[in-house]
Amino acid sequence: MAKGLAAGNEAAISGYSVARSLRWENGELYILDQTRLPGEIMEEKQESAEMVWDSIRRLKVRGAPAIGIAGAYGLLIGTRPLLGKSVEEFMAGAREVAAYLAGARPTAVNLGWALHRCLDFAAAHSGEAKDSEELYRMLTAEAERIHAEDRAICRGIGESGEPLIREGCGVLTHCNAGALATSELGTATAPLYLAFAHGCHFRVYSDETRPLLQGARLTSWELQRAGLDVTLICDDMAAYVMSKGLVDLCIVGCDRVAANGDFANKIGTLGVAILAKHFSIPFYVACPSSTIDLNTPCGDVIPIEERGSEEVTSFGARRTAPEGIKVRNPAFDVTPHDLVSGFITEKGIIKPDYGVSLAKVVGQ
Ligand code: MRU
């Protein structure tokens, strides 16, 4: 474990720096433990597939694109013990490791997407590889490509969304769809980082995001560190700031977009979308095009992760609810497509009719 930001742990973005959610160096995966932020900055070297699974499950690494990248590297760590076996045995073992890692969290499509991409790549190249070591090297290059592509995709999302950020405007975001949730610029934050770098002045309102406080601990931390004008609000204050005319635009991230445009994101997103409609505020969703899942026809069938009751019955280390109380803790909710003004992707802003436009973008 390394205390403090290690060399290479920060990415320079247009002159300022953001912490990297993870890094791959000399064949090793280091994850910034986000459960400790903002108080403590600590990286953990991942020693096994079990450790990567646990890091994803416990939200040490979180955010849809970041868990996809962590999964791809986790597959490498999990298949390391198979080196020296036959290519066939390696492939069989890789399938098992991928299925195991994919089970860490169910809602974001990116985890399964990245693992499938790696497995399909390995299967397609297994005939060329003279041994498991060579196949492992090829697989490493594929995981590194997924990582590098995510950096470019975040930038592309930023370029697509930047024109939405107007001088003097107020932007509300929910949860953390920032650099910490991806490889670099984030998704919902990418237009903000680019606009800021180009001299635009605007205010960001960051929802706290109960129960795990990704907005308070992560979004407000990373935006403040980068120098943006960010104001933290509790989730139940969103209606108030909107009613005061302080919000001109909402941008949130996304864990999965169904074929009809319904999408899953952090619990509370649906409430923000409903409020935005009430106050006639444009509501945009930022995501890589790989988050569009045409195999999921509509939001009703997106699997929603339910997490432990202790996240709701406590605030930090302190219990805040009676013993024995019944609790629900869905980690995500689904927002219907008719509340979405557009999907900001690296391929441009996708507008309704989503049944048609999303399929077109995925096919490009
Ligand atoms: O439970 P989390 O922290 O992984 O939830 C994260 C979100 O809901 C993000 O908005 C989403 O994954 C998009 S990240 C670019």
Image (cartoon, rainbow, N blue to C red):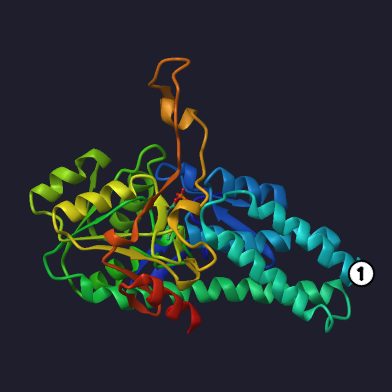
Tell me residue 55's x, y (percent). Answer: 59, 47
Question: In the structure shown, which secondary structural element does the residue marked by tag 1 occupy?
Answer: loop
Tell me residue 148's x, y (percent). Answer: 54, 75
Tell me residue 52's x, y (percent). Answer: 65, 51
Say whether mark 1 is within 8 Å of ligand 1: no
Using the rendered view, name the quadrant where residue 81 is placed: bottom right
Q: Is residue 84 left or right of residue 30?
A: right
Name the amino acid, label 1. Answer: Ser
**Badge 1: few (under 14), some or many (20 or more) residues near its Cα, within 10 Å?**
some
In the image, residue 125 sits, relative to residue 205, either above or below, namely below
Out of 333 and 30, give the one closest to the viewer: 333
Q: Residue at x 80, y 75 (%)?
A: 135
Using the rendered view, name the quadrant where residue 360 is placed: bottom left
Taking the image as four quarters, which one is ligand 1 found in?
bottom left
**Circle 1 residue:** 86
Q: Residue at x 59, y 65 (%)?
A: 113
In the image, residue 65 sits, relative to residue 52, either above or below, namely below
Out of 142 and 300, give the one closest to the viewer: 300
Tell me residue 229's x, y (percent). Answer: 20, 57
Q: Is residue 70 left or right of residue 139?
A: left
Residue 99 visible? The answer is: yes
Out of 218 and 66, give the one closest to the viewer: 66
In the image, residue 63 sits, relative to residue 359, either above or below, namely above
Q: Residue furthest top?
A: 323
Q: Is residue 218 left or right of residue 81?
A: left
Residue 22 visible? The answer is: no
